Image: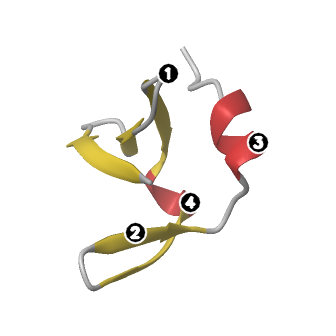
């Protein structure tokens, strides 16, 4: 389970994933497939999220 922690001006969103090793990831807003009942569904796998590197 994760929490949306920021919507950035460069068309990315920041997600904090809960758990013993709390991690924060930044992914493109275009990865958001849908929003419903306060939840965001991404159209990508957890592995995609973990390995995404925003362009510099």
Please identify, in this view, whether the residue under mark 2 or under mark 1 is nearer the observer. Answer: 1
Up-down relation of residue 23 to residue 37 (above or below): above
Separation of residues labelled 2 and 3 (CA atoms): 17 Å
Report the side of 7 relative to 19 (left or right): left
Separation of residues labelled 3 and 1 (CA atoms): 16 Å
**Disc sitting over residue 21 in the figure:** 1
Up-down relation of residue 42 to residue 14 (above or below): below
Dot placed on the residue nearer the N-terminal end, 3 or 1? 1
Separation of residues labelled 2 and 4 (CA atoms): 10 Å
Separation of residues labelled 4 and 1 (CA atoms): 23 Å
Q: Secondary structure at mark 1?
A: loop
Please identify, in this view, whether the residue under mark 3 or under mark 4 is nearer the observer. Answer: 3
**Disc sitting over residue 40 in the figure:** 2
Residue 40 picture location, percent across and down: 40, 69
Which quadrant does the N terminus fall into?
bottom left
Return the residue nearer the eye: 53 or 9. Answer: 53
């Amino acid at each position: 389970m994760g929490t949306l922690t920021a919507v950035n001006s460069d068309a990315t969103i920041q997600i904090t994933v809960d758990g013993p090793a709390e991690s924060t990831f930044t992914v493109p807003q275009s990865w958001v497939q849908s929003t419903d009942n306060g939840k965001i569904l991404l159209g990508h796998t957890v592995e995609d999220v973990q390995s995404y590197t925003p362009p510099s």
